């Protein structure tokens, strides 16, 4: 039930709960009451009424941006604790000024939900502070049957003491296999990050961990310390770690990587280090360390905005090529001052990932030019098992020559069935797209194509030529083509459409032809 932005207030919240209590067979309830001026009285009344739903096992309750405060949070928790059959609870109280007292009280109450196995608790922007974080953790540690916990505490000023205290408390959840912690923007610092990591290492059954510590000023010391702690997570197989915008340099990145290499059972890793200061040496060191994760099969590495340059891109690629079991790789290197040499070197190195079948490579907003585009494509053509490729080279000064060269190179990816290629903002004109299209038509196994060519200099001739080429992609069933903000007139649009009509196996088509200038059609 969605009833948000309706100003129902305390009376409406309590009344709604009382009415729902009469639904005696209700087992699953989703209730969205965000931004409704509900205060402590309304929240308490709602909770007390829901207790009468004696068969309720699954509850999703959204009370974002109301006015329930500390008393309302504690009372709501106490009421829900009496829902004796509740096993799955999603409760979002973000933006309610519950403070440290409300957080601790809520946690203590929920600890009495004896059958609770899955809990998702959102408390973003509630000023709970270090005492509230520690108290909440201590209380939740008593949820002895908890197997899945997602805790959102973004923007709560918990500091280093709060982070360490929260970790120490949650360490008592010895049976917890799945944990998600969102602690963004909390002034945690180096000591807090290290303390949190060290404490959580005591969750001996933890196999899946998602930890977001972005915007926390943890620096090199915190990055290395956190990594060293994570190395003790002996059963960890899946890790999502976001350390973006944390002033981490090359020492922190290298130290983090070296430590993670000791997670011997790690098979899936998503590591976010965007907007730090790791540079070329940090990128190489991180890659070299991750190459020692011998069981790693899926890797997403986000290094946007780190000034790694040509040396860092090539070095990172060479290191990752040693990940012999890597089958799925997503590499985000946007805005890193990478030129032609770096792009070509990266591609050549990745070609040695012999088991790579799925590759996403974001090199947008760099300086690879036409030579880099062609070189990268030629190198990737050697990835003989590559079936799915997503390549973003937008805003890279590639021009006509580079577009044609890239296309001809990718045509050699003989097993490619799914291709997403973004070349927006590259000054590609009719000549470039006329070379790109026929080349892609040679990808004989291509069934799904997303081609982004917005904000270029393509005219009527180029659009028609591209369409004519794509009609030769005999196995193409799904096509998304973005030619927005070019110079395609009525004739070009007609030519493109006529050509695409000949794609006999095409079942799904998305076409974007928004233009830089008005197109005048004759009446």
Image (cartoon, grey):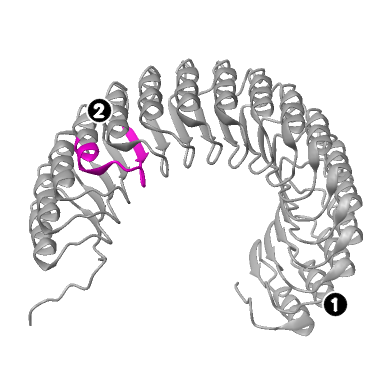
Which sits earlier in the primary sequence, circle 1 or circle 2? Answer: 1
Question: In screen coordinates, is 415 left or right of 80?
Answer: left
Q: In front here: 492 or 163? A: 492
Q: Which residue is mark 1?
A: 41
Q: Quadrant of the N terminus?
A: bottom right
Residues in magenta? Answer: 387-404
* Dot 2 crowding, Cα within 10 Å, few <14, some 14–19, many 20+: some
Please state the horizontal and vertical placement of residue 516, each as a whole percent of the image.
26, 66
Which residue is rendered at x = 21% and y = 36% of the image? 407
Q: Separation of disc 1 and disc 2 at Cα? A: 63 Å
Q: Are marks 1 and 2 in contact (CB under 8 Å)?
A: no
Q: Nearer the viewer, residue 247 or 298?
A: 247
On the rendered structure, is 10 left or right of 398?
Answer: right
Under circle 2, the secondary element is loop
Q: Position of residue 470 (x, y in %)?
A: 14, 46
Residue 458 at least partly seen: yes
In the depicted structure, whether residue 286 falls above or below residue 334: above
In the displayed structure, does residue 140 sit left or right of residue 415? right
Q: Is residue 402 magenta?
A: yes
Q: Which mark is residue 452?
A: none
* Residue at 87 percent of width and 43 percent of height: 142
Q: Element under label 1?
A: helix
Instruction: Tell whether position 215 is magenta.
Output: no
Image side of residue 89 versus residue 516, left or right: right
Q: Which residue is mark 2?
A: 415
Front-most of residues 233 and 141 = 233
Q: How would you rate the neighbour count of disc 1 (Cα within 10 Å): few for under 14, some for 14-19, many for 20 or more?
A: many
The picture places residue 438, in percent across and down from the top left corner, at: 12, 40
**Where is residue 427 drawn, in percent x and y?**
26, 49
């Amino acid at each position: 039930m969605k009833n948000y932005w309706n100003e129902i207030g305390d009376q409406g919240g309590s009344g709604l709960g009382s009415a729902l209590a009469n639904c005696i067979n209700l087992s699953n309830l989703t209730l969205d009451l965000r931004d409704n001026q509900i205060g402590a009285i309304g929240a308490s009344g709602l909770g007390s009424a829901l207790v009468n739903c004696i068969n309720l096992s699954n509850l999703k309750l959204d009370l974002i941006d109301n006015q329930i405060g500390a008393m309302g949070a504690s009372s709501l928790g106490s009421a829900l604790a009496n829902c004796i059959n509740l096993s799955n609870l999603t409760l979002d109280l973000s933006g309610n000024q519950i403070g440290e007292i409300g957080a601790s009280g809520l946690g203590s109450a929920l600890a009495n939900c004896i059958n609770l196995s899955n809990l998702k608790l959102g408390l973003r922007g509630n000023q709970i502070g270090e005492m509230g974080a520690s108290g909440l953790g201590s209380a939740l540690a008593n949820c002895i049957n908890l197997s899945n916990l997602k805790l959102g505490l973004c923007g709560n000023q918990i500091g280093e003491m709060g982070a360490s205290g929260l970790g120490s408390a949650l360490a008592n959840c010895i049976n917890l296999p799945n944990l998600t912690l969102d602690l963004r923007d909390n002034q945690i610092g180096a000591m807090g990050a290290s303390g949190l990591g060290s404490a959580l290492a005591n969750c001996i059954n933890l196999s899946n961990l998602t930890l977001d510590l972005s915007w926390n000023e943890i620096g090199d010391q915190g990055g290395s310390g956190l990594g060293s702690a994570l190395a003790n997570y002996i059963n960890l197989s899946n890790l999502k770690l976001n350390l973006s915008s944390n002033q981490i340099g090359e020492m922190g990145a290298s130290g983090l990587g070296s430590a993670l290499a000791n997670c011997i059972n790690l098979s899936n890793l998503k590591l976010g280090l965007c907007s730090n200061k790791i540079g070329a040496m940090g990128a190489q060191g991180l890659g070299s360390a991750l190459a020692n994760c011998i069981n790693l099969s899926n890797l997403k590495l986000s290094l946007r905005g780190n000034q790694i340059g040509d040396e860092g891109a090539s070095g990172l690629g060479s290191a990752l090529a040693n990940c012999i079991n890597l089958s799925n790789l997503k590499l985000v290197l946007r805005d890193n001052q990478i030129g032609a040499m770096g792009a070509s070197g990266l591609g050549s190195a990745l070609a040695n990932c012999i088991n790579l079948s799925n590759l996403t490579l974001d090199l947008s907003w760099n300086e690879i030019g036409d030579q880099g585009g062609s070189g990268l494509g030629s190198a990737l053509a050697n990835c003989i098992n590559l079936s799915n490729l997503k390549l973003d080279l937008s805003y890279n000064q590639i021009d006509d020559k580079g577009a044609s060269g890239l296309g001809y190179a990718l045509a050699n990816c003989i097993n490619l069935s799914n291709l997403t290629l973004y070349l927006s903002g590259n000054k590609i004109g009719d000549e470039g797209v006329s070379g790109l299209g026929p080349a892609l038509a040679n990808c004989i196994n291509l069934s799904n194509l997303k081609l982004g060519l917005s904000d270029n200099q393509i005219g009527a001739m180029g659009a028609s030529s591209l369409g004519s080429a794509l009609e030769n992609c005999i196995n193409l069933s799904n096509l998304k083509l973005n030619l927005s903000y070019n110079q395609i007139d009525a004739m070009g649009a007609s030519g493109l459409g006529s050509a695409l009509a000949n794609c006999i196996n095409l079942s799904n088509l998305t076409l974007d032809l928004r233009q830089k200038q008005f197109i005048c059609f004759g009446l």
